Image: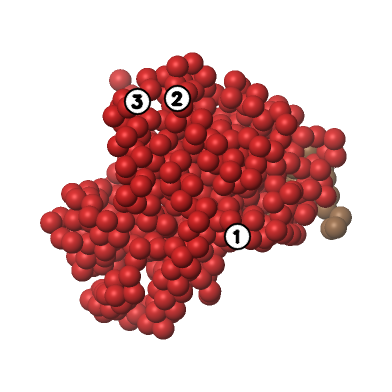
Amino acid sequence: MSDLLSKFDALIAERAGVLAKGVRDPFAIVMEEVKSPTVAIIDGNETILLGTYNYMGMTFDPDVIAAGQDALTRFGAGTTGSRVLNGTYQGHKECEDALKEFYGMDHAMVFSTGYQANLGMVATLAGKGDYIILDADSHASIYDGCYLGNADIVRFKHNSAEDLEKRLRRLPPEAGKLVILEGVYSMLGDIAPLKELVAIAKAHGAMVLVDEAHGMGFFGENGRGVYEAAGVADDVDFVVGTFSKSVGTVGGFCVSNHPKFEILRLVCRPYTFTASLPPAVVASAATSIRKLMHAGDKRARLWEMTRKLHGGLQARGFRLATTTPESAIVSVLMPDQETTVRMWQAMLELGVYVNMSRPPATPAGVFLLRCSLCAEHSAAQLDTVLERFSMASAAIGLFALAAE
Amino acid sequence: MTATATDRASVYVRIIELIEPLNVKKVGLAENTSFAGDLEMDSLTVMDLVASMEDEWDIVMPLNMLPDLETIGQVADAVTKLVTK
């Protein structure tokens, strides 16, 4: 019998090599207790959370928790069914109503995860003979949506208007086209030049889908995302998003003004052939979305904390992926895998959790310690974080290594 | 736009030139050399190579073609077909 898992031998050996050096597994963290959006207990230690995408700190909002508790009691633990059969409860409709209001759009479809929202929309919108034109650094859920569908897939250089234009120009003018962009790219934390990219897509007759997973809540006048801040709302056909970041629970969605949008509920397989979200989740999400419409103070605090971390790390000599804080993600560039893991572990032992990111999740060859801010981070917490970044880098000799 | 030759032999020669900088293991390059097996290229490198070939011949090589293109010879065939279309 041939072992089907032997294709992963190289990865198993690489991981064993890293772990043999005495570092702990960066992909096997257990949060034993979660005290707030910014503090958890890991290995018995109180740890500042600086890598959870909990941008608006809604996970412990009292109204959000109360709405979930009430729905759990009244509607039960789960729906045991698809959205198109027995799995649409009052709460799912209310959640979609909240999204329509938040985005000022006619239609909203709630999926069970953000991953499924991209998987479903991308695979369903573009069919055989159509073209998908996607940014090279697109999230895995977008690439997987491409591979689930039957369209021809064309990739353009990350955030390059010139490259997008060049690739669109080569396509048959009459063919259906879907250009897929993200407001914030979650690895480096950079934002897309949506004004330029959307204009080029429209000039070539393409429909445009923008993923605002990391932009919802704090970009634009109404917190709709980078596309709102860029002033291109009228030219974006579909906005995809998630409940697992600013909204503070789990789930995904697509909103649109397209008059035929509702038919997608019957033809979008990752929507149709899975169980709907539990009543508690949609109730929490709807409450959170409505609160995010009036979260100006939180938005301001999130940006203030982001600037503080970005500036503080730069002042301490760390190399960052963006020269200015473009989003609420601050990514620290690291030289190689081993140094990244050692630095990550040193930070954890000092009581700060950040994400470790490596290829192929990151763009070619880039190793990162990725920090994401929360509106609930205090200035004192960030002072502690900055001090510990300095301590950790001294302990592992990061700057001596980088200077070599 | 450069006036790149479009016959099979010229396309093959130019593809070898485009692959060479990515050939970190210095594997001998031939018709039957495979991208995943022999050159050990990861998917990102392959996609970047596709982009450079698209620009070289001003063609569209959709990523969904890639699973059928395992060797340099197969890529040369596919590019030749696209440029003469």
Lower sequence index among marks 1 and 2:
2
Name the image quarter holding the C terminus of chain A: bottom left
Contact, CB < 8 Å: mark 1 with mark 2? no
Q: Nearer the viewer, residue B2 or B17?
A: B2
Lower sequence index among marks 3 and 1:
3
Determine which quarter of the picture holds residue A77. Answer: top left
Tell me which amino acid carries mark 2.
Answer: Tyr
Question: Disc 1 is attached to a residue of which chain?
Answer: A
**Residue at position x 42%, y 19% from top?**
A81
Contact, CB < 8 Å: mark 3 with mark 1? no
Q: Nearer the viewer, residue A148 or A115?
A: A115
Q: Colour of chain B?
A: brown
Lower sequence index among marks 3 and 2:
3
Contact, CB < 8 Å: mark 3 with mark 2? yes
Name the residue tied to disc 3.
A75
Tell me which amino acid carries mark 3.
Answer: Phe
Q: Secondary structure at mark 2?
A: loop
Q: Which numbered tag is attached to residue A220?
A: 1
**Residue at position x 55%, y 36% from top?**
A97
**Residue at position x 79%, y 48% from top?**
A202
